[in-house]
Image (spheres, helix red, strand yellow):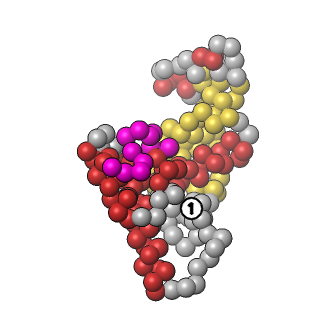
Amino acid sequence: MTAIEPSEHTIDELENEIETIDDPDELQSMFKAEADNKDRKGAKVLIERRLSEVEDGEEESETTTDTDPGMDESDFADREADLIAIRNRVREVAADLIGRDLDGISSIRREEDNWTVVVNLVERHSVPDTQDIIGRYEVHLDSDGEITGYHRLSRYRRSYTDYEGWC
């Protein structure tokens, strides 16, 4: 039995929980528990990534003593950002960058050395909320996760379900 049961957490919650685990055996147990229960690919990728970080950290501490105590998960320098890191980066900055409430992320795609993320933001709150005006924005990031620009693609009412109505 693991200290954290992965099936009792959403993937977002699990991501926060596993950041505190530095024991490779515990992470391997969590991976097995996830595979035996819900078997969510996203959860397994998170656990594998953390396991790799922990194992790499052990190797680095055995071979070097020069570390940067200021580095944390959000630092993208000297490494390529992965999909989850890009998602988290956009979640952190999109609302402040555009000045609207983040409603969700519609897509994330890699294009050569850059990332393109489509986000939905509430441009105008209404009652009922089905009448909210939602803006679809494209946010561009470089390979290190730094935002290079954004622009609005379209606006639509939350109640629209027909894609043609979004233009």
Q: Nearer the viewer, residue 83 or 51?
A: 51
At x 43% / y 60%, what residue is drawn? 50
Range shown magenta: 1-13
Residue hosting label 1:
73
Residue 133, picture quadrant: top right
Q: Nearer the viewer, residue 116 or 7?
A: 7
State the SS at label 1: loop
Residue 55, picture quadrant: bottom left
Label 1, residues with CA under 10 Å away: few <14, some 14-19, many ≥20? few
Q: What quarter of the picture does the C terminus occupy?
A: top right
Q: Amino acid at mark 1?
A: Glu
Whether residue 150 is visible, yes or no, is no
Residue 4 magenta-drawn? yes
Q: Nearer the viewer, residue 142 or 130?
A: 130
At x 60% / y 21%, what residue is drawn? 157
Q: Where residue 74 sits in the image (x, y, percent)? A: 59, 60
Q: Where residue 125 sits in the image (x, y, percent)? A: 70, 23
At x 49% / y 80%, what residue is drawn? 61
Residue 6, picture quadrant: top left
Residue 36 magenta-drawn? no
Q: Where residue 118 sits in the image (x, y, percent)? A: 54, 42
Query: How many marks are shown on the rendered structure?
Result: 1
At x 46% / y 64%, what residue is drawn? 22
